[in-house]
Amino acid sequence: MAVNPKKHEMPAQKAEVRAHNFEEVALGYSPEIALEEAARCLNCKNSPCVEGCPVNIRIPDFIARMKEGDWEGAYQIISRSSSLPAVCGRVCPQETQCESHCTLLTRAKMDPVGIGRLERFAADWHNDHAEGSAVKPEPNGHRVAVVGAGPSGLTCAGDLAKKGYKVTVYEALHTAGGVLVYGIPEFRLPKRIVAREVDTLKELGVDVETNVIIGKTLTIDELFEAGFEAVFIGTGAGLPNFMNIPGEALKGVYSANEFLTRSNLMKAYREDPVTPIMKGGYVAVVGGGNVAMDAARTALRLGAEKVYIIYRRSMEELPARREEVEHAEEEGIEFHLLCNPTEILGFENPENPRDPRNGFVTGIRCVRMELGEPDASGRRRPVVIPGSEFELHVDTVVMAIGTSPNPLIKNTTEGLEVNRRGGIIVTEEGLTSRANVYAGGDAVTGAATVISAMGAGKVAAKAIDEQLRRQS
Ligand code: FAD
Ligand code: SF4
């Protein structure tokens, strides 16, 4: 039977409707579409797609189950390798991971199988039909503390809990989920999906203590004094970077983290929010990653009249997921590519220092760039075009140019070594320079991906288990 060369489209809310609401954009496959998409898989013997998956999900095996309509069987295969499949099916950059290795693409130059979309379908089906199915394992008597309830911490906690460890997760914020709840917006990843995954962990016996900042409320050393035998640090990279250009202290300049946290976690998008946030006007978002796309599309939904993405390279180098870029363009976000800000402009009335408009953003000055020779990252280096300055009128600027690990735990944990970017130094097993202290995810690598953070949580859970078995 001939294979359909095209991947089945993901049903989605119409651009003109979704640009004004926070509901999920991508609606998910129907069972009929899932069956047809699964039928495109060739079940290749060498499974190249598996190599492209950072946690090596047995992709052909789960798709084979889907071909038979065995959705729960497919989910069970996926969940052996991934503890957050409903999340990964939605946010993984599949086009650069599993799908980029798919034989349909590499050999036949067709669309790859929609692996992520099928994963999402199986996970959603399970979540809708298999309420409370987690089986609490026999306790093994050992206690482990996990710091941070993002994907790395939750994965580490889940894997250890399944082996019988008593795990307590300490989270600084009032909700578990890390970037999945405070960063990635509802229209891309509904919070109920993350809450469901956290509930599954609780069913396994994991305790989640929110509003506890390790390094302030308690230190890593105090966790050991309290009887924990190992600690996993999965504190992410939540410290925003700025460009250090004039005007970044003006009113109306946000880091993307602050902007998204205000909207996502503090519900600033509601009619009567306790947390203030800009609503309306012209907005410039600086950066080209997923964070920039999320901030731009959030600004639009909050009521901005115009939203610009300002990115210093070209569309080809834009690091955000393709689907998010396409969705942003469809929604009317304007891309200023090969541009870089040099100054944020503000209002100043020299005659009246009490003028309420003083200190507020009025615009952004940029220069145009062209691409030169490749730099250390292999991407062509953007070079300023002299005399190309221009200004855009904006009321708000959101900086989405990357984040770094927060130094709090390093500063309060003697002997914990970090690299020059603030990432915790670990061995291949995730062991830090301190005995029985492990780390993984963005806290180690700097800002990366959900699946790589989960992979690191898995590796560390295995190493902690082996270490504590050796010790007992
Ligand atoms: P985090 O998710 O950052 O979680 C760390 C947790 O630790 C947080 O909850 C934090 O509050 C807590 N914490 C920090 N310090 C302490 C402390 N001292 N004590 C207690 N708790 C503490 N990746 C993708 O793969 N696809 C995407 O589409 C995507 N989109 C993104 C969009 C945005 C807006 C952002 C910001 C990131 C995005 N990413 C995406 C990246 C991805 O979300 C991260 O790589 C991933 O969440 C890292 O997981 P983590 O567990 O290491 O850290
Ligand atoms: Fe199926 Fe593509 Fe994986 Fe082959 S490479 S098994 S066609 S998903």
Image (cartoon, rainbow, N blue to C red):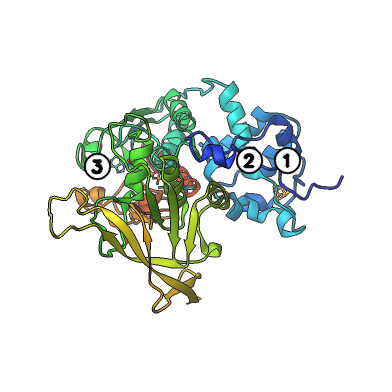
Q: State whether residue 460 appears in this view.
A: no
Q: Where is residue 242 in the image (x, y as percent from the top left)?
A: 30, 59
Q: State whether residue 140 appears in this view.
A: yes
Q: Which residue is found at the position 43% from the left and 41% from the top?
A: 151
* Residue contact at pointers 2 and 1, CB within 8 angstroms: yes
The disc at residue 37 is: 1
Amino acid on which disc 1 is placed = Glu
- Seen from the viewer's position, the closer of residues 226 and 271 is 271
- Label 1 and label 3: CA atoms lie apart by 48 Å
User: Regarding mark 1 in the picture, which secondary structure is present there?
Assistant: helix
Of circles 1 and 3, which is in front? Answer: 1
Q: Confirm or reject: label 3 Cβ below 8 Å from ligand 1.
A: no
User: Regarding mark 2 in the picture, which secondary structure is present there?
Assistant: helix
The disc at residue 401 is: none
Q: Is residue 22 above or below residue 340?
A: above
Q: Where is residue 293 in the image (x, y as percent from the top left)?
A: 47, 50
Q: Which residue is found at the position 51% from the left and 60% from the top?
A: 318
Q: Position of residue 159 (x, y in %)?
A: 46, 36
Q: Which residue is found at the position 59% from the left and 47% from the top?
A: 56
Of circles 2 and 3, which is in front? Answer: 2
- Label 2 and label 1: CA atoms lie apart by 9 Å
233 left or right of 452?
left
Q: In this view, does 452 lie above or below 17?
A: below
Residue 359 picture quarter: bottom left
Q: Name the residue under label 2.
A: 117
Q: Is residue 347 above or below residue 223?
A: below
Q: Name the residue under label 3.
A: 220
Q: Which residue is found at the position 25% from the left and 64% from the top?
A: 246
User: Regarding mark 3 in the picture, which secondary structure is present there?
Assistant: helix
- Seen from the viewer's position, the closer of residues 202 and 378 is 378
* Residue contact at pointers 1 and 3, CB within 8 angstroms: no
